[in-house]
Image (cartoon, rainbow, N blue to C red):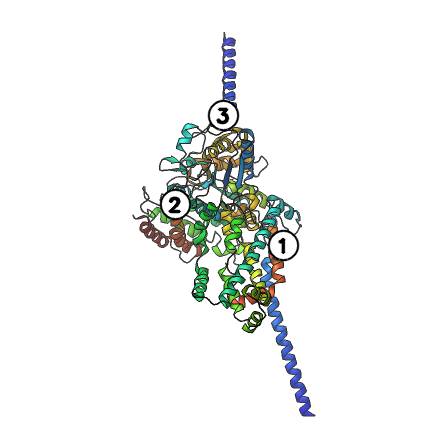
Amino acid sequence: MATWQTTKDSLLGQKQTKLLMDALVYVVLTVVGIIFIMPFAWMVANSFKDIRGIYKFPPEFIPEVWHFENYTEAWTATHFDIGFLNSALVAAAVVLGQLVTASLAGYSFARLRYPGRDKIFLLYISLMMVPFTVLLIPLYIQMRAFGWVSTLQAVIVPFLFTPWGTFMMRQFMVTLPRELEDAARIDGCGFFRTYWLIILPLTKPALATLAIFTFVNTWNSYQWPLIVLAKPKVKTLPLLLASFQNQSAMRTPWHLIMAASTFVVVPVLIAFVVGQKYYVRGIVTTGIKGGG
Amino acid sequence: MIRKIALLVAVLALLSFGFAASAQDMVDWTCGTVDSNTDAAITITGWEGPGEVDKFLLAFDEFFEAYYPNAEQVLNTGVAWSDYWTTLPAQLAGGAEIDMAWMHISRNDTFASNGWLLNLDSYLEACPIPGWPDLFVESMRDAFNYQGSQYAIPYDFATVGVYVNTDLFEEAGLDLPDENTTFEEFQELAIALTQDTDGDGETDIYGVSNLASPGAGAGGLYWIIKSFGGELYNEDITGSELNTPEAIAAIQWVADMIWEHGAHPTADAVAASGFGGEFFFANGKSAMHFALNDAASRMWELIGDSFTWSVVPTPRGSAGHFNNAGGSAFSIPASAAHPDLSYELIRYTLSNPDHLCRTATMGAALVSQMEFHDCAAPDDAPYADVYHDVFSVVGGRDAIFPAYHPRFQEWSSSVWVANMDLLWTGEERDAAVAVQRVHDQTNEMLGG
């Protein structure tokens, strides 16, 4: 009886300890979550204030008066409708392009056998080490020569190829069992059919990861579009967002920037929520948070 | 007889007025070098975004509609200020066909010396800008002149004033400072106005804000150094002259406001506000605030009816009264595809009296033509009665700025900011130490 009681007490104690530990973990995670979400919540709260409310001391989280008109004012202050279309078009084209080129190149580097394959792969991924700033002027000159300055091609075509994406696809593809390919060959598949019917379907998780990273990077891309896109009709969202900044920080319409930032960040937020597990997997697989 | 003479004088006066008016009406806003049917696409790039750029866009539209209806404007305005200075050089180095670019006094010499800007002397000679040079603010004209040639035409002008919370002065029984207030008297005022209102040992109201902060360039302090009798560089800008007792005293005066007297918010306090020094003044937490005139309209918006305030001139030093000036201009890049059309557009935008008052009213800073400085402050603004005197008359008269030589930005970030930040963060309290480091490194860089 005493033994049973002791065991019961011990189990109850373990259960209580586990419960306590779980509660502690949840409390810590909740606090960390709140800390992480605060800047976003602050942005949304400020998007409903007027400029005086933003500068107010002591600061108020909930606006005294809700200025919903900030959203319409920010939307109409510049060409956000065109900006959304441009950003969506560029992001879609670059994502699609990178999925095709990176998966083909990854397949080649992972599975095909040809002289100098590994050296070419090393050379290709070494491009990740070249800072993009170094390429700005040569790339601009190239775009001018093609007559692509201030066209969407200038922000799509140079980014259709990705050493980082190729590296990721190759790393994923080398883990796939060779037997599947051999079986396909026996059934009469050539290289391309094997790639299309066997390799690609098995690579979906890696493709999804690449798609999420590429979408977020392209959607947020700023420096290159700023240099090469001069015409208002081709500008992407980050450029329009930055146009609110004034020479003097004091004259910057922070309330409009907050409103515009809120509606600009929504697609990225959706992409992240939908593909969260692939995003995390990408970081775990490659050790890199997004590629160029 | 007297009546006849009076009549003659009146007729002559009317005639001369009529001639002057018709001469003004007859200004040809084209220079005769561009075909009026041109369908050229003129590319314009600048940092002013929605709101602030509108004053110019109206003038651009009017110009093209009246003289070149088939030409197209490609507007790349609203490039963020900090990005503009990395983007534009990359574009120009890549041969971008930009026809007109916003320029700033702090960058003009760098761009001109790199051969990125068109020398405008021949344009000014062949097709003079009405009012040029006499009606334009002299210091701004000079600021865009590099080695004797004009590389940009100034469009605005900004000077520093002291924004004062008159309620706090009244409560303390103190008189507002004026242009004869010395730096010592100003410091005494700042100390007297600094308050710990709830007695918790923390300062609640600072005497002064926005004198210096980490990352601040030399431009904002140069006028104080000059007021004390100091100088940044030697005459031919081959070395430093900063390690003089006068320059050191000027910088020590600023550092003491923060660390010795606690009359100015520390860098940590400013960072905690999430904004700049204006946060303190707008919330009644500083009694005096140094800022350019372009801050006035936003200050009005932020303060509303919370307290009464005004603007007064900067203090006077032993070497005289000086004031920091800034300004921007329109330039034509050397790689422009349509420089003649750009010049005409600049000429029309910056000198047509029909719209300059509108430009002045819509803009935050003063326009470059002095005759239109009266238009800048709205009649109902709290600063309307003093704005013109403080910023245009006194500010304009005593306006100075550092020698913005071609390597100024490089010097500013790697020498000035790197060492002066030690003072503003409190890592170093002795101005002589920071100044000596700037002095030595300046000589090393400029080869003195």
Q: Which mark is residue B305?
A: none
Q: Horizontal placement of A28 versus B435: left or right?
A: right
Q: Are marks 1 and 2 on the same chain?
A: no
Write down the chain letter for disc 3.
Answer: B
* Nearer to us: label 3 or label 1: 3
Q: Nearer the viewer, residue B268 or B17?
A: B17
> Badge 1 local density, few (<14 within 10 Å), some, or many (20+)?
many
Q: Are marks 3 and 1 in contact (CB under 8 Å)?
A: no
Residue B205 seen in this snapshot: no
- Badge 2: few (under 14), some or many (20 or more) residues near its Cα, within 10 Å? many
User: Marks 1 and 2, how far apart in space?
Assistant: 43 Å
Q: Is residue A165 above or below residue A244?
A: below
- Give the distance between the C-alpha atoms of the residues marked 3 and 1, in whole angstroms: 53 Å
Q: Chain of mark 1?
A: A
- What residue does disc 3 label? B28
Q: Amino acid at mark 2?
A: Ile
Q: Are marks 1 and 2 in contact (CB under 8 Å)?
A: no
Q: Amino acid at mark 1?
A: Ala
Q: Which mark is residue B225?
A: 2
Residue type beneath disc 3 = Asp
Q: Secondary structure at mark 2?
A: helix
User: Picture coordinates of residue A137 (x, y %)?
Assistant: 44, 49
Q: Nearer the viewer, residue A51 or B162?
A: A51
